[in-house]
Every structure is written in C-alpha cells, then in structure tokens.
Amino acid sequence: MALSLSSNHTVHSTDTCDHCQTALEITARFCGECGAPGRPRHSHHSSSDNRNFAQSFAAHRTPGPMHQSADHASGVKTQLLQRAPQKVPTFAKPKNEVSQELKEELAKLIVLLARERIFLYMHCGIFLTANLFGFYVAMRCYNGYIGDEMTKLIMALTPLLFINAVALACLAPIKGTKREIARLKEQLTDVKFRIEYRNVF
C-alpha cells in the first residue's frame, strides 16, 4: 500500500526569538531561554499533507469484517429472492371464512368435553366421599363397641369392606370418562387444525 509519507520528513531549520535573539528550531513553539512564544506559522502545507494522507488511506484501506458480512448477507438475500418461485403453488387456495359445519362441530365438541369433565369430577367426588364415610363408620364401630380386640376388629371390618367395596365400583366410570375425554380432545385438535389450515384442504 503506497502512501505518501513526505510529511514525516521535516527539515529542522532554525529561527531566532524576537525577545532574546536565541536560535530556535522551526518546530519550536516557545523559546527555551525566555519562554516567549514563537512566531506564528502557517500550517497550510501540514493540513494539506494530512488531508492527502487521510484520503490516500481511505482509498487504499480494505473493507472490515462488518462490511464484508453485510455485503455477504445482502448477496445471499438477493440469491434467495431470485430462486423463490414466482407463481403461487397449486395447492394454495384463497383464504375463506370458516364454514358453519366446522363452527357447529367445534361448539359441540367443547360442550361434550365440558360435560365429560363434570362427570369425571362427580365420579371422583363420589369415590372419595364413600371411602371416607367407610373409614369413619369403621372407626366408630371399633371405638364404640365394648369387647375384646378381635371382636372390635371384626365389627370395624364389616362396614369398611362393604362400603369401600361399593365405592370401588366408581373406578369403572372414572376410567371410561378419561378415555372419552382423550377421544374428544383428539377430535377437537383435528377440528382446530382444519379451521387453521382451511385454505390448504
């Protein structure tokens, strides 16, 4: 990179001080003997040399990594835009309104899902209430019966086995309700998918 460096080679000529007539260098701003300021000098040549040096440096400097990455990104974007298909794909259709059938099916599934969840909560509540009632009756029979330990244990197991065995019957509808909720969720997801991508189907 050829740059003009003539400004760096300065001729050290001498001058005299106005007050004490001491010899001064051309680059000195103050007198070394009396401290008086030197004669004002024009810096036209120095400023022009600096300006030429800056212009030469700007003309010959290489672009930095930021400029290179920006140019590369713009080039890649241009290539992608050129490769993009100019025609609309054949499977795409104009966006239309949601059909009334899909709206009705979506509302029906939401209502059925809410009903099944209510049934599930009700069956779970019955199961827990029956078990708690069975334990309560068993504890009352055990603590209230006057007799030996074996008789008290038999008296406590009678309501516990009967009431809790009846409560176990609630497990069947609970399991069936969970399967129905899972099936309704799958149907609801399918309907939402068809509504969202109705312009493709």
Image (cartoon, grey):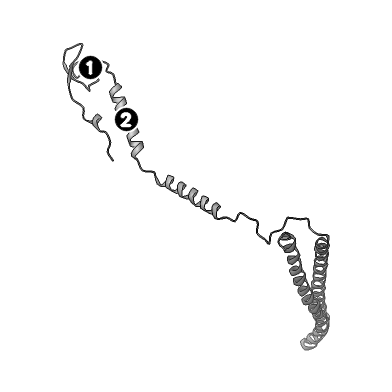
Q: Position of residue 34 (x, y in %)?
A: 20, 15
Q: Which mark is residue 35?
A: 1
Above or below residue 107? Residue 11 is above
Q: Position of residue 175 (x, y in %)?
A: 77, 77
Of residues 7 and 25, the one nearer the viewer is 7
Which quadrant of the figure has residue 24?
A: top left
- Where is the N terminus found, in terms of image quarters? top left
Dot 1 falls on a residue whose secondary structure is loop
Q: Amino acid at mark 2?
A: Asn
Q: CA distance from mark 2 to mark 1?
A: 34 Å
- Where is the C terminus found, in terms of image quarters? bottom right
Q: Is residue 22 left or right of residue 107?
A: left
Which quadrant of the figure has residue 192?
A: bottom right
Tag 2 residue: 52
Residue at image x 76%, y 75%?
179
Q: Which mark is residue 24?
A: none
Residue at image x 35%, y 40%?
61
